[in-house]
Amino acid sequence: MISTGRKCVACGIEFWKGKMRQIHIAVLTVVMAQVLLGGCHSQRIKPDKLEGQYDVAAYVWPSCHHDERLGDVPWPDGTGEWEIIKKGTPRFEGHYQPKVPLWGYEPDDDPKVMERWIDAALDHGVNVFIFDWYWYNEGPFLESSLNNGFLKAENNEKMKFYVMWANHDMPQKLINPYKYADYKMRWNGDVDMKTFKIVVARVIEQYFSKPNYYKIDGKPVFSLFSITDFLQGLGGLPQGREAIDYFRAETKKAGFPGLHLQQIVFGPPGKELVKKIETLGADSVTCYNWNGPHPEDYIQWGVEAMARRKKSDEALSIPYFPNASVGWDDSPRFPNKQKKDIVHVNKSPQAFASFLQKAREYCDQHPEQPKLITVFAWNEWIEGSYLLPDMKYGYQYLEAVEKVMSGEYNRY
């Protein structure tokens, strides 16, 4: 009996060993099938896999910090334009005001804040920041976001950047309607040649010299907001051309092959504007946002903007870089604005994604030019246009960029 029992135990052990081998093989087969089949149908191309193919450049409005030089004039509480953003009020039922950032009311001149911005941007397919840059009253304004925030961020060299000289006039009521009662001009955006040379030297030394400054064909890109104010300050079109020639020469002296001048346009240029753009020798054009008019319907706004882009394309012989705009709601700056003044119908991350996809397709249809898309905006809280996460949409706008630029959005 004892010997018979040992044989039975040995047989049982061998039986279970065989079963375990069968189960192990079955599990491996299922796992391998999931990997192979899943890889064929659900593999995603992350944004970094498209590096070098598309440049998605988001405008940075650097107003949410205290400017040591002029900050007390517009925003005396010391937090920059957060002071105005927090005062936003709903103008109709369902109107989302004030805007509430998911990460809180952070100062945009803090390097730690910028480090998170850079990581979030790159993780979702935004690889260029365009900093709005100002020069008022013989000196810079709101420059600390770029100088102390971005350039001091430990990871800043991962992110490309360039500057857009926002050389427009600044009415006092526009920057703080709660402090000023009229639109008297607080600062003028135009400069004379003497001041322009100071601006050129500062931009080349402080920014062009950085290895991550955005370039096209090796040429640093410098974006000009207002051609009208530029020419007004310099005295006319011939003087404007002389100034740009000087800028190009100084850029070459600094060791670059030249300057890439990018002109902001606000609609299809007429003959006079085309002449100005051509005379200055602009290398490309784009827009800051989809511009006006601003219908209540977001999709209508986008469709009309694409029609304006087509007309601009036809009028100009230089590259036009497409723009995708998140939204438009500048009501915190204008206490009297109402529903009809705000883009709110059909505004969603999904609708934004569809227009970003159209911008990407425009790039594909123009293989002769760099695949650059400008986005309004990274953080224009005051104008209701931002990719940064907030309490209503979370990360949905950033995720929309990732889906479009990775190729996941356009599945067919």
Image (cartoon, rainbow, N blue to C red):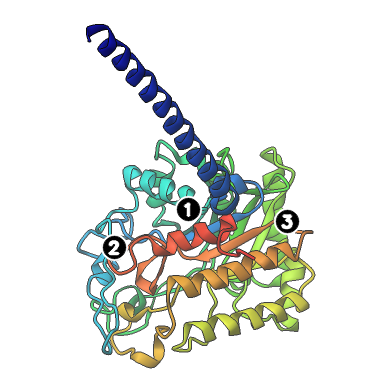
Residue shown at 73% from the left, 61% from the top? 283
x and y, in percent, of residue 83 in the image: 24, 67
Residue 285 vertical position relative to residue 46 in the rendered view, above or below? below
Q: Earlier in the sequence, mark 2 or mark 3?
A: 2
Q: Residue furthest top?
A: 3
Mark 2 or 3, which is nearer the eye?
2
Q: Amino acid at mark 2?
A: Pro
Q: Earlier in the sequence, mark 1 or mark 3?
A: 1
Q: Tag 3: Cα neighbours inside 10 Å, few (<14), some, or many (≥20)?
A: some
Residue shown at 45% from the left, 59% from the top? 399
Q: Name the foreground residue: 100 vs 214.
A: 100
Residue shown at 70% from the left, 79% from the top? 310
Q: Quadrant of residue 313?
A: bottom right
Residue shown at 30% from the left, 56% from the top? 65
**Rendered image: mark on residue 124:** 1
x and y, in percent, of residue 17 in the image: 39, 22
Q: Amino acid at mark 1?
A: His
The kind of secondary structure element at disc 3 is: helix
Q: Quadrant of residue 69?
A: bottom left
